[in-house]
Image: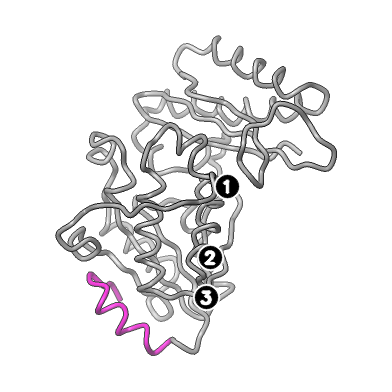
Amino acid sequence: MVFKTHKSLTQHLLKYKNQQVGFVPTMGALHSGHLSLMERAMKDCDFLVVSIFVNPTQFDNASDLDKYPRTVDDDVALIYKSFGTKNCAIYTPSVDDVYKNQTVAKNYSYDGLEHVMEGANRPGHFNGVGTILEFLFTVVQPQRAYFGEKDFQQLQIVKKLVEKLKLNIKIIGCAIKREPHGLAMSSRNERLSKEARACASFIYNSLQKAKIHFKNNSINNTIKMVETLYDQQSLLKLEYFTITSEETLIPVQRKYHKHTYRAFIVAHIDGVRLIDNMRLS
């Protein structure tokens, strides 16, 4: 069933209160990456809830919000075609249902995770993420919630949010789903021209090169190597490439033994902002 209000969804979910409920929050424009999260949830849980809501408070750019694809009818049809209707509920609220008459984000502290990378480049973004997820977690009350590693910083922040709010929810991170040429699947990819989409595969290629280079070179040397690669690109514009501790997300300057590092990248093409990441060690 499709629910447009949180009250009707809450009422429906009462019958599943003694079962394992898995939750996949989305902003719609669904693709195979989203479906892979739902497949995992269906495998782990008795019942699946999917939300489809373009959350205005996590956009720092009004134009980006306006351009974000909205394909709710197609998304609902895809979910039911893939998983049926028996063990699945879809929540497609209006802005008013979520925020009433005050579309404002709360303020959250994520112990510094919010101040680097996307947090530094998109002020207020993770306050918006926290606001909508606190609302959705309260409404759905799942035992498990599933997020893709493409938004790895967001994944770490969601884990911190659950810890801070003392919610009994297990956050499951799932591997990045990629297109055949390596581009990380994203709803934003649909805005790319055919030429730009092919060119954007360079993002994944550059991460692979960084991983190989990182084995025998310093962090700074690896960063400079990647920046040089993008200097030679005519269509792709690099916003940032950084290497961080996977746990703290703080950019690092030198390697330490038995430490886990991850590379993060943001690049622009065709007026579309694309993100990706990869574990280096």
- Give SS at disc 3: loop
- Dominant secondary-structure state across the stretch colored magenta: helix
* Three-letter amino acid code of the residue under disc 2: Glu
Q: Decide: few, some or many residues near mark 3? Use Cα within 10 Å; few <14, some 14-19, many ≥20.
A: some
Comes first in the chain, label 1 or label 3: 3
Q: 244 left or right of 240?
A: right
> Decide: marks 2, 3 in contact (CB < 8 A)?
no
User: In the image, which disc is placed on residue 35?
Assistant: none
> Decide: marks 1, 3 in contact (CB < 8 A)?
no
Q: Decide: few, some or many residues near mark 2? Use Cα within 10 Å; few <14, some 14-19, many ≥20.
A: some
Q: Which residues are magenta?
A: 1-16
Separation of disc 1 and disc 3 at Cα? 22 Å
Image location (x, y in percent) of residue 99: 22, 61
Separation of disc 2 and disc 1 at Cα? 14 Å
- Give SS at disc 1: loop
User: In the image, which disc is placed on residue 143?
Assistant: 3
Which residue is at the front of the view, 102 or 216? 102
For this orientation, the residue located farthest to the left is 101
Instruction: Relative to 141, say whether 241 is above or below.
Output: above
The residue under label 2 is: 39
Comes first in the chain, label 2 or label 3: 2
Instruction: Relative to 268, say whether 156 is above or below.
Output: below
Image location (x, y in percent) of residue 16: 43, 86
Q: Is residue 8 magenta?
A: yes
Q: Is residue 21 magenta?
A: no
Q: 18 left or right of 175?
A: left
Q: Nearer the viewer, mark 2 or mark 3?
A: 3
Q: Nearer the viewer, mark 2 or mark 1?
A: 1
User: In the image, which disc is placed on residue 176?
Assistant: 1
